[in-house]
């Protein structure tokens, strides 16, 4: 196990996860366009929902790239990590929309695991993560995300 790799990976996850929320708070109208282009499933539910915007995607990629650069991991790895985290987040949103779960509703596990596991697994070699590191980072991220959910819901 590598505590440094876990810490760096956790920082990348926090950047990717927090940046869309921050961008939404401070850039309200800018690029507030839905990633799913308002497409719907046959049941009438949106594919991803109104909370998945191009602004959030761009913010996640840029924040992850900046954090990775600061950590000496490089812009490209950070950008890829952020994009993968948002792909995992979009996957969980698509599942929730298929189940007619309202946008913004927290589903413990589903809201954290895909966005953590996808980038951690696909960037494991570059981040020097083994299975224990991936598991610990995912669990830490889940705890932080669940613990701060109430703060993100406040307006």
Image (cartoon, rainbow, N blue to C red):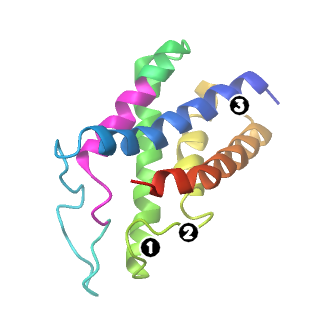
Identify the residue position indicated by label 3 in the image.
6
Q: Seen in the image, is 71 located left or right of residue 138?
A: left
Residue 138, percent from left and from top: 67, 47
Mark 2 vs mark 1, CA separation in Å: 8 Å
Secondary structure under the numbered disc 3 in the rendered image? helix
Count of all numbered marks drawn on residues in the image = 3
Q: Nearer the viewer, residue 81 or 70?
A: 70
At horizontal 76% and vertical 43% (from top left) the residue drawn is 136
Magenta segment boundaries in residue numbering = 49-65
Q: Is residue 3 above or below residue 18?
A: above
Please tell me which of labels 1 and 3 falls first in the chain: 3
Query: Mark 2 = which residue?
Result: 107
Q: Residue furthest front?
A: 155
SS for tag 2?
A: loop
Label 2 neighbourhood size at 10 Å, few (<14), some (14-19), many (20+)?
few
Residue identified by numbered label 1: 96
Q: Quick one: which residue is furthest to the bottom in this view? A: 43
Question: Is residue 128 visible from the viewing direction of this image?
Answer: no
**Within 10 angstroms of label 1, few (less than 14), some, or many (20 or more) residues?**
many
Q: Which of marks 2 and 3 precedes in the sequence? A: 3
Asked if one can make out residue 14 in the rendered structure from this viewpoint, the answer is: yes
Location of residue 50 (image quadrant)? bottom left
Residue located 37% across and 34% down the image: 61
**Which one is in front, 44 or 148?**
148
User: Along the polypeptide, which appears first: circle 2 or circle 1?
Assistant: 1
Q: Please, is residue 36 above or below residue 147 in the view?
A: below
Q: Is residue 58 magenta?
A: yes
Distance from disc 1 to disc 3, alpha carbons, whole Å, reads 29 Å
């Amino acid at each position: 196990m590598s505590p440094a790799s876990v810490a760096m990976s956790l920082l990348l996850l926090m950047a990717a996860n927090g940046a869309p929320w921050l961008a939404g708070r401070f850039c309200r109208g800018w690029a507030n366009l839905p990633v799913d282009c308002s497409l719907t499933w046959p049941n009438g539910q949106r594919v991803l929902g109104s909370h998945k915007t191009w602004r959030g995607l761009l913010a996640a990629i840029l924040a992850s790239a900046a954090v990775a650069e600061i950590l000496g991991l490089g812009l490209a790895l950070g950008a890829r990590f952020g994009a993968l985290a948002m792909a995992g987040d979009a996957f969980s949103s698509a599942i929730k929309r298929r189940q007619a779960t309202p946008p913004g509703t927290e589903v413990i596990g589903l809201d954290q695991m895909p966005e953590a596991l996808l980038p951690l697994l696909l960037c494991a070699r570059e981040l020097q993560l083994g299975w224990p590191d991936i598991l610990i980072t995912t669990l830490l991220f889940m705890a932080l995300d669940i613990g701060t959910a109430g703060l993100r819901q406040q307006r």
